[in-house]
Image (cartoon, helix red, strand yellow):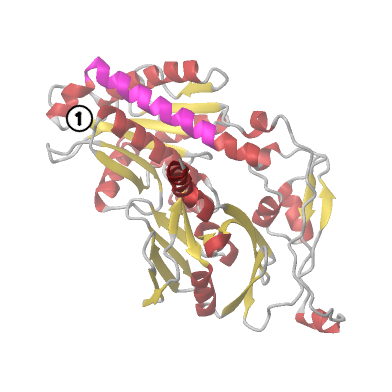
Amino acid sequence: MQNYNLKLKTIFFFLWFPFLIFCEEKILLYNQDANLYVYAPYLQEKELVSLKEASSAFKATFDFNPVIQEASLKKDGIKCFLWANKNRAILDKKEIILPFPPKLISSKIYVPIELIKAFAERLNMELRLDDKRIVIAKKGNLLANPKDGFWHILKDGETLWRVSQNYGVELSSLLSLNKIIDPRFVTPGTMLYIPNPPLSKKDENLKPQTPNLELTTPILEKKPEDKSILQKYGIKKIVLDPGHGGKDPGAIGKSGLKEKDVVLDIALRLSNQLKKSLPDTEIILTRDADYYIPLAERTGLANFKKADLFISIHANAAFSRAASGFEVYHLSAVASDKYSEEIAEAENMVVERFKEKNSSLLTELILKDIAQTEFINESIELGLLVQNRVSERLSMKDRGVKSAFFYVLRDAKMPAILIETGFLSNASEEARMKKEDFKEGMVNAICNAIVSYKEQYEKKLVER
């Protein structure tokens, strides 16, 4: 009996061991020179911090390729490349060995503090880690005691941007410190924590020094629990976008099956299934029949409706008749591989073919906006769920979650993915797409993934 209990305890320990090791907390990243504050997920046991938020604190460029699990950090000509589960990185063309390999958890890449320190040093900056705060500044400028802040009550007609300008605080800092998910829903009367500007070196020297003074993170007063948080920030509207339509047939299979017809059928079925599975969620279709809609108007509708998810549905094609499988894409300035770039170019050709508006300046502004949002990470999370569910349900070749610059996704102000349901250029998959059990299986798998994503997302909201 004792041996049996010991075995049970051992099994229980190993089941929970990963969760004990990677117990996520939050740490405040403070760029003293820019007066910029960013909260970052933090795994204290191994001192691993989320690289996405760390890059924001440095005002550096961050990119992550989920396919090859490679992350990059770039600023002022200094480049750092690293990979999940590999204890080496390339910093400024030199290899460095890490104390712990970076970890990929819930689509976030976590890296050792030592790597952040090394990156800071290459930028002629220094870093100090306290109990709940990482402070960075140019070498020689690191202060012993950055000042704490105060509370501001948002007035009628006052915007968060105006508040940030009045107090000289980065808007991203204001959102991060106050844990604001969507600025659109911040109402008058909301209490906002405003950090004080840092002391100058001269001011600090004039201030009496306190022996053994400990740095502490500003403590935010716990606000009364908002029972309507899910009503405000939960996933309430989902836009389904059947690709092509009308004068644009999309890909055409050997037997004549058209992409526009396949994806419309799947989208209509998915709409009905989601309405049953999520009765409190509004499901919106960009088209419900065979007519053409310009690419910009598809996300334009989603933005106008203030949708929370945008899902564009397509069918694939390739020069190779043997190409097969299911894949999901999210928006990125750089394609994950040459094939993904070609797929995006094929889908984007409609802009030239039907002379839709396309501004390189607009593209540049949108890409700049993309880099400042969390939509990419959320899109990857949704994409991974869809990819896994469909591959399991239909036993299709798993082609992975990839990235490319799709015009149909670029304007989306919410998590957005593009699904390629299979290859019409493959005779076997074309025949399969005509079958009822395939379409039902595809719809059920995608629906299951969306429901799971909604549950996980809203659980995080409540826990915050």
Q: Amino acid at mark 1?
A: Leu
Q: Position of residue 2 (x, y in %)?
A: 47, 44
Q: Residue at x 51, y 57 (%)?
A: 52
Q: Position of residue 218 (x, y in %)?
A: 76, 60
Q: Circle 1 — which element?
A: loop
**Apparent side of residue 23 relative to residue 436 in the rendered image (left or right):** right
**Apparent side of residue 37 relative to residue 307 in the rendered image (left or right):** right
Is 313 in front, or is 73?
73
Where is the N terminus found, in terms of image quarters?
top left
Give the prevailing secondary structure in the magenta stretch.
Answer: helix
Q: Position of residue 332 (x, y in %)?
A: 41, 50
Q: Residue at x 79, y 38 (%)?
A: 224
Residue range of the region highlighted in magenta in the rendering = 434-456
Q: Position of residue 244 (x, y in %)?
A: 33, 28
Q: Is residue 354 visible?
A: no
Quickly name the residue at label 1. 424
- Does the stretch in magenta take in 302? no
